[in-house]
Amino acid sequence: MLITIEDYKKITGKTLADEELAKVETLLMAVVGHIENILGYELEEHEIVEFYPYMKNIYLNHRPVIKVTNVFISGESDKEMRNFRYGKSSNFITLIKYRECPCCYRQEKEVEITYTAGYKELPDWLKFEIVGLVDDFINSFDEEISKYTSYKIDDIAYSMRDMLTTRNDKLNNIARLIYG
């Protein structure tokens, strides 16, 4: 798990009762899951094989890129091509021996890239953002529930949807920061 209850306790300075542990852990997983849904991929470290059209600069889809393992170009005599440049802070590779000529257009070339992306451990800024969202959600939920002495299920459902909608902007901003 990328973020734990211990991270939550350390960042907020709160101690949690046994009944609150499950709620906070579920909310942490839900926020991470929602961010992953927005991005379209897992935040945990994983290996990816993707296919791209033959171009000089190829931008990789998953962030952050840890390492590029292999680059294969279809139609090349040397199947495994190691002539590429990848900067550690960039999310793209540059094919060094790229040739843009009419002969390349006759046959469609495809580039197969194998790389590793994701986080072994979430950076502190991301943990802080996620914990802030969870804490804000818990406080808002407690505040919202305290308004009702008698309630209908529709009232709570609508207020929950409103809370999720307001937090959605924050989640989108976090996803933008990750994607770069």
Image: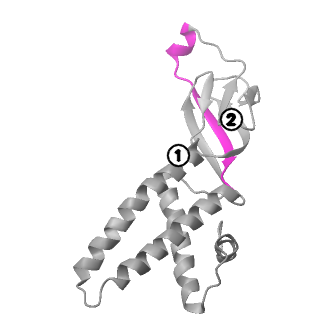
Q: Is residue 19 above or below residue 173?
A: below
Q: Can residue 119 be seen at all in this image of the molecule?
A: yes
Q: Is residue 166 above or below residue 18?
A: above
Judged left or right of residue 146, residue 22 is: right
Along the line of sight, the residue nearer the viewer: 92 or 136: 136
In the picture of the structure, the residue carrying the numbered disc 1 is: 176
Judged left or right of residue 7, residue 171 is: left
Along the line of sight, the residue nearer the viewer: 62 or 95: 62
Q: Are marks 1 and 2 in contact (CB under 8 Å)?
A: no
Magenta residues, start to end = 102-119
In the picture of the structure, the residue carrying the numbered disc 2 is: 90
For marks 1 and 2, give the CA distance.
16 Å
Q: Is residue 85 above or below residue 16?
A: above
Residue 137 position within the rendered picture, expressed as x and y whole percent measured from the top left = 46, 71
> Looking at the figure, which quarter contains the N terminus?
bottom right
> Looking at the figure, which quarter contains the C terminus?
top right
Q: Quadrant of residue 128?
A: bottom right
104 in magenta: yes
Residue shown at 30% from the left, 85% from the top: 148
- Check disc 2 and report its element: helix, strand or loop: loop
Residue shown at 58% from the left, 84% from the top: 21
The amino acid type of the residue labelled 2 equals Ser
Q: Can residue 45 be seen at all in this image of the molecule?
A: no
Residue 69 position within the rendered picture, expressed as x and y whole percent measured from the top left = 74, 41
